[in-house]
Amino acid sequence: MSAETNNDSFRENILVVIKDIQEELNNLKTIKKKIAKRKTSKRRTVREGVKRKTAKRRTAKERVKRKTAKRRTAKERVKRKTAKRRTAKERVKRKTAKRRTAKERVKRKTAKRR
């Protein structure tokens, strides 16, 4: 009998705790809704009263005419200079590398062994 009463009281306590948690959850939800309402109320609708102006069409006389590119005659154009070819004498010859003899070369020093 005492086991059953303990079990029943335990269930009642759990139910009470669950109800408290549900009430807190409901309170949090209402707070969330209030915050959401505040944010939406501060937002402005698409600019009231200010509308985009439609583009006015201009008549042919009002439009600025584009200037056409003038074509130049052969005499007016600046001619490109052709590259001059140099003769063999005018060109600078490359120097060939001189080979050194064994005596002329500097010998590397070898590391001393311990």
Image: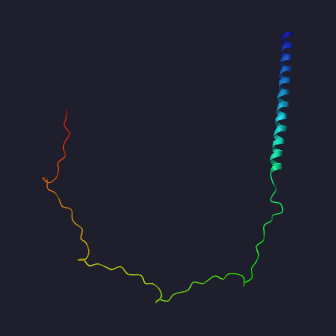
Q: How many marks?
A: 0
Res 10 quadrant in image: top right
In the rendered structure, the answer to whether residue 62 lies left or right of residue 71 reads right
> Residue 30: percent from the left, percent from the top?
85, 38
Residue 79 sits above or below residue 50 on the image: below
**Quadrant of the image for the N terminus?**
top right
In the rendered view, tell whether residue 83 sits above or below residue 30.
Answer: below
- Give the vertical position of 36 relative to 22 (above or below): below
To which quarter of the image does residue 111 belong?
Answer: top left
- Comparing 31 with 42, the one in front is 42
Residue at image position (66%, 83%) is 65
Question: Which quadrant: the C terminus?
Answer: top left
Q: Check the image and name the residue furthest to the top.
A: 1
Location of residue 15 by image quarter = top right
Residue at (81% x, 50% y) in the render: 42
Q: Position of residue 14 (x, y in %)?
A: 83, 22
Residue at (84, 20) in percent of width and height = 13
Out of 24 and 65, give the one closest to the viewer: 65
Residue 60: x %, y % from top left: 72, 84
